[in-house]
Image (cartoon, rainbow, N blue to C red):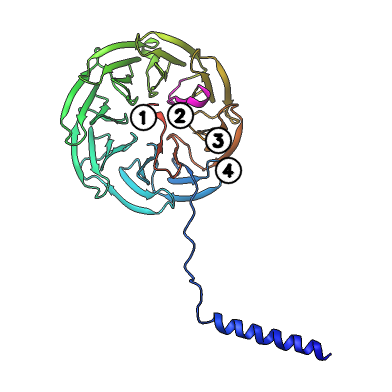
């Protein structure tokens, strides 16, 4: 009994001594730094922007921009730019979804349908008031603007110091990205109108017209190298081309997907679908596939070399696809008119996950992998 009390007393004394010595130096209560995950970001006509984990579909955040979104989100320097139909551009923190700033342009009413592009300190976007704007990403002030003679529904692209954009007025423009001064203008003959966005690869620009012709122009002076016709007036090209490995690949309103040799302008392969193809293809380089979707409710994966279909995914509710796909981390991301954002296995086409965002999806998803690299679909004017 005596020994037990000695143990207890010694223990109490030791504990009291430790508490007394530690109480003078408490550890800091500073919170741990936040940990962020890669994101796939999408919007729709339900006026919300969503960020999901690309591998699980877990929602990171959502933000209400208050209007329909048809233009694809633009990710640039860790910031997310969302263009709404009513002409307001929201600048969000891509990791948290919090608002950094927003701006709109004064003057004649306009709509923002074309996806913007950014380079340096400027963001470039075309509007339905016939004008291409260059806006400072920091201040929201207009750096310069250039007027065309009709709406700009085509998304611009930037290449070697020039902004290249096409207009409904039937012309393609190359403008100095710092000043807006034109370098050259290409006018199609017969007169065309453009919805498709230009893609640039090496020394050439590729752009499809609503008259059903795909053009290859020289970047240096805008002169025509070749033109390739789809099927007459029903072959209007709204799909933006993807240029990869000597191939120019695009969809058409004549229910076909075309692969044209960039050197000769001759077809390498053509595949027929069940309806119009407005979606822009994306080259899955790892699997040597081209992914594109159509109004026939299908997402197709073509072998780049010969056009054979490796797999196709059919919308479970027969909803059309206008959104353009993007491939990241072995997954194909695409939105549908059934209000779902899909993550498909890029090798098999099987559904990994899907999320209902309660709105028709016409724009295309973007990926933030936290590295500073932007992963955008071909609709944004990028080429692979």
Disc 2 target residue: 322
Disc 4 target residue: 56
For the residues bearing labels 4 and 2, Cβ distance under 8 angstroms: no
Spatial distance from mark 3 to mark 2, Cα to Cα?
A: 16 Å
* Residue stretch in magenta: 276-288
Residue 81 in percent (x, y) is at 35, 44
Circle 2 packing at 10 Å, graded few (<14), some (14-19), many (20+), is many
Would you say residue 367 is visible in this rendering?
A: yes
| Foreground: disc 1 or disc 3 | 1
Choose top left, top right, bottom left or bottom right for residue 169.
Answer: top left
The mark found on residue 382 in the picture is 1
The mark found on residue 343 in the picture is 3
Would you say residue 294 is visible in this rendering?
A: no
Among the two numbered marks 1 and 4 on one chain, the one whose residue lies closer to the N terminus: 4
Spatial distance from mark 4 to mark 3, Cα to Cα?
A: 9 Å
Q: Is residue 272 left or right of residue 1?
A: left
For the residues bearing labels 4 and 3, Cβ distance under 8 angstroms: no
């Amino acid at each position: 009994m005596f020994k037990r009390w000695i143990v207890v007393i010694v223990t109490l004394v030791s504990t009291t001594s430790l508490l007394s010595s530690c109480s003078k130096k408490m550890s800091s209560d500073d919170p741990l730094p936040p940990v962020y995950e890669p994101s796939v970001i999408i919007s729709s006509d339900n006026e919300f922007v969503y960020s999901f984990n690309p591998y699980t579909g877990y929602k990171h955040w959502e933000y209400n921009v208050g209007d329909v979104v048809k233009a694809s989100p633009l990710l640039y320097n860790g910031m997310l730019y969302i263009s709404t139909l009513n002409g307001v551009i929201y600048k969000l923190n891509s990791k948290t979804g919090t608002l950094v700033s927003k701006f709109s342009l004064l003057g004649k009413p306009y709509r923002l349908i074309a996806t913007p592009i950014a380079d340096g300190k400027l963001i470039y976007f075309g509007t339905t008031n016939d004008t291409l704007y260059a806006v400072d990403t920091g201040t929201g002030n207009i750096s310069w603007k250039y007027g065309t003679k009709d709406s700009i529904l085509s998304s611009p692209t930037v290449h070697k110091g020039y902004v290249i954009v096409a207009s409904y007025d039937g012309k393609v423009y190359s403008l100095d990205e710092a000043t807006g001064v034109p370098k050259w203008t290409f006018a199609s003959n017969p007169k065309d109108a453009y919805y498709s966005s230009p893609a640039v690869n090496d020394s050439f620009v590729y752009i499809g017209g609503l008259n059903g012709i795909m053009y290859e122009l020289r970047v240096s002076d805008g002169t025509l190298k070749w033109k390739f016709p789809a099927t007459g007036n029903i072959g209007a090209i709204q799909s933006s081309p993807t240029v990869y490995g000597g191939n120019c690949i695009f969809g058409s309103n004549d229910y076909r997907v075309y692969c044209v040799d960039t050197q000769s302008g001759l077809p390498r392969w053509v595949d027929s679908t069940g309806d119009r193809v407005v979606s822009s293809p994306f080259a899955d380089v790892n699997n040597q596939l081209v992914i594109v979707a159509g109004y026939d409710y299908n997402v197709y994966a073509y072998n780049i070399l010969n056009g054979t279909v490796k797999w196709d995914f059919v919308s479970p509710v027969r909803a059309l696809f206008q959104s353009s796909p993007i491939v990241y981390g072995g997954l194909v991301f695409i939105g549908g008119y059934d209000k779902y954002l899909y993550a498909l296995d890029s090798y098999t086409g099987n559904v990994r996950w899907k999320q209902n965002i309660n709105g028709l999806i016409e724009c295309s998803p973007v990926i933030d992998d936290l590295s500073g690299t932007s992963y955008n679909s071909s609709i944004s004017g990028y080429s692979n």
